[in-house]
Amino acid sequence: MILITGGAGFIGANFVLDWLADSDEPVINLDKLTYAGNLHNLASIEGDARHLFVQGDIGDRALVAGLLAEHRPRAVINFAAESHVDRSIHGPEDFIQTNVVGTFHFLEEIRAYWNAMEGIEKAGFRFLHVSTDEVYGSLGPDDAAFTETTAYAPNSPYSASKAASDHLVRAYHHTYGLPVLTTNCSNNYGPYQFPEKLIPLVMMNAVAGKPLPIYGDGLNVRDWLYVGDHCSAIRAVLAAGKAGEVYNIGGCNEKTNIDVVRTICAMLDALHPGSPVTPHEKLITHVKDRAGHDRRYAIDAHKIERELGWRPQETFETGIRKTVAWYLANPDWVANIATGEYRHWVEKQYGSQA
Ligand code: NAD
Ligand code: DAU
């Protein structure tokens, strides 16, 4: 079996669902269930004996040691993290605690587990750490895309904490020989994304007739990847990636934020003409920019394509169409996620601007 962490969050839950749709290998899913963890994401596999959910912290060494000893996973995939840049600006501490200290404690237990292995079991073991393109910093309009050898230059408390965890993972390979794989991926979108992130936030607000907040001039660029493509890339890296290597994962879909929001608005005009305000673009509102807002991210994904034969299946147009359709078809999931904590966050972040 495999052990994954953060599997009740956006990407982790998509990964678990895709994994079990594709294979009978069981998954232990360790997740703390922070505000971002949501068991509704896993409702379709409720009662499935191949999925064992455990609520807990990656930094809880006794718990992690017990899970490893009892289940003896052949691989571990670490999705668990605090993941939202704006929250890291308001309060960095949780990011340091989980992404840095938590990853350190987790790695220590993985190292002890792997050290005690022997033979084929030891040789085949892998620890895959899921990271982000944000560790590479910000690009100018004409700069080449990030490669696996681009120097780290994180700009937010979030990206600095992810960079620190990446460095720890690298050091555990270099110093102790732990067979690690690191993936650095661009912006994901798709089903089950918590609506604090741009795409689900815009969709939720648009159908409710609320303002669509665009930070600054809206010309910041992100490289968007459909979450199912990220999951297939992780499966490819786990199956055939070389221990100690880093793989960049990207969608080859650079878009400005304003273009992303306009595309969603146009889709909703066609698919949801009954919204309180149409055309939905009328709701676009420019608000105060994010502090230290990175201007552009772009991923060069040639290495994973060349070495592992992976490339994204979705274009932005096909992926965003699926995503908009999913959110419209799942109003119960959206209603469930709009908890008190979520409303509190919206008030704190956007105040009277949205
Ligand atoms: P998310 O915030 O939706 O989910 C994170 C999950 O981790 C939640 O279920 C949460 O409960 C769990 N978690 C948090 N702290 C924990 C702890 N201490 N112990 C155990 N579980 C804990 O995040 P996401 O968007 O699904 O991102 C998953 C991973 O992918 C993160 O490591 C993130 O940095 C990385 N990533 C995300 C994106 C993106 O666009 N969302 C892109 C590249 C990389
Ligand atoms: O690049 C990968 C990263 O992508 C991941 O590592 C992070 O976990 C993930 O959250 C995401 O970070 P971003 O900051 O790029 O994503 P977010 O959805 O928060 O914002 C996308 C862009 O949209 C960014 O330029 C900020 C802008 N934005 C965001 C929000 C929430 C707005 O203009 N308005 C908003 O209300």
Image (tube, helix red, strand yellow):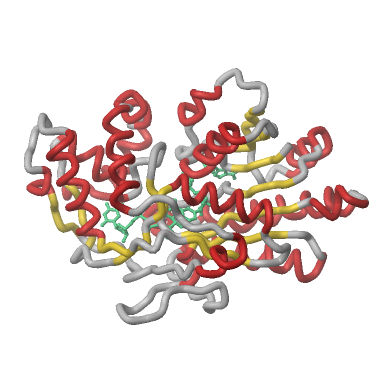
Q: Residue 267: x and y, percent?
A: 19, 43
- Tell me which corner region of the image, top left, top right, bottom left or bottom right, holds residue 186: bottom left
Residue at the location (37% across, 57% down)?
224
The quadrant of the rendering that contains the N terminus is top right
Q: In the figure, is residue 128 to the left or right of 185? A: right
Q: Is residue 48 left or right of residue 260?
A: right
**Nearer-the-camera pick, 338 or 120:** 120
| 303 or 11, nearer to the observer | 303
Q: Residue furthest top?
A: 47
Q: Residue at x 64, y 28 (%)?
A: 51
One can see residue 12 in this view: yes
Q: Residue at x 49, y 59 (%)?
A: 185
Residue 119 percent location from the top left of the image: 92, 52
Q: Quadrant of residue 305?
A: bottom right
Q: How many numbered marks are there? A: 0
Residue 158 in view in this figure:
no
Q: Position of residue 105 (x, y in %)?
A: 71, 52
Q: Residue at x 36, y 27 (%)?
A: 333
Give how far across and how far down residue 10 sits, in percent. Answer: 46, 41
Question: In the figure, is residue 72 to the left or right of 209?
Answer: right
Give 150 or 66, whichever is nearer the viewer.
Answer: 150
From what the image shows, is residue 19 above or below residue 235? above
Q: Is residue 338 above or below residue 303?
A: above
Left of 45 or right of it: where is 59?
A: right
Task: Name the foreground residue: 150 vs 339.
Answer: 150
